[in-house]
Amino acid sequence: MNFAKLRGRKSSKAKEKQVDPTIAQTKSEGSGLSEEDEYLVQIIEKAKKGDQSAFQKIVEKYRTQVASIAYKMVGDYEDAKDISQIVFVKTYQNLEDFDTTKKLSTWLYRITINASIDFIRKHKKHKHELLDNIFGELREKKADVEKLYQRSLINWAIKSSMEALNPRQKAVFVLRDLEGLDIKEVAQITGMPQATVRWYLHRARSKLRGELTRHHPQLLKKMGIKHEVQKG
């Protein structure tokens, strides 16, 4: 994509209740920078000045993580690709406002979560992979098919059960339990207090356990999780 024509076209629609990523950036931990961080800052500064190759390096560095979060939010690879493209367009348009003393990944992931929530609200759908697609992929694998089958079935059950979560619960669950970020970073990305993040995470886990108990009790048994229906 040619990003050069996009600079300055900042969307006027972003006045929703979501946190503005260009304003609500949070401080990164520590004051010292590693060599990798210093190099990244140099790349960002070049990209701010319109260096296309520098911005492309940013895209290449974070493309996988952004796509992963988007996919886990919306459950469809093609939609995740579209969201990723939106994320990097918004990043390019707002990069000149980014404070390089802050953490770029936190800012990017916030844009990704917001873009995913926008998508979910706009389309009101959560398209997850069909079992047929999973089985088709399994047939092409040469590893232990039974283990792959069980793992894919569990993943599918969790993804389908995630439809019961509201956007904020899903965002917290994806960032904390699927992406493995700590509570502090999840709070920075979502713009919520850590206590609020913990509450949403608790609610998300409770809902997921309840959904899995109702619809996939045998899978819970295989996973070694007790069949306890969480109410409320």
Image: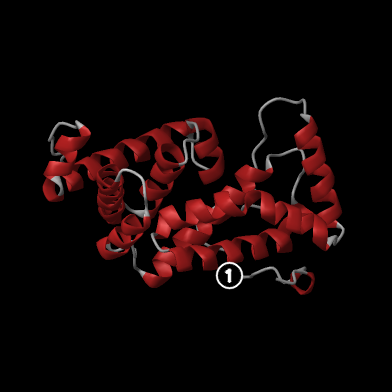
Residue 63 position, x and y percent, is 61, 54
Please identify the residue farthest to the front as the structure is shown: 142
- Give the residue at x 67% y 35%: 27
In-image side of 70 versus 111 (left or right): left
The answer to which quarter of the image holds residue 130 is: bottom left
Please identify the residue farthest to the bottom as the structure is shown: 5
In-image side of 24 versus 46 (left or right): left
Residue 159 position, x and y percent, is 31, 52
Residue 226 position, x and y percent, is 15, 31
Residue closer to the observer: 106 or 148: 148
Is residue 152 shown to the viewer in this render?
A: yes
Residue closer to the observer: 16 or 175: 175
Q: Mark 1 points at which residue?
A: 13
Label 1 sits on a secondary structure element that is loop
The answer to which quarter of the image holds residue 138 is: bottom left
Which amino acid type is marked by label 1? Lys
**Which quadrant would the C terminus be assigned to in this image?**
top left
In-image side of 34 versus 166 (left or right): right
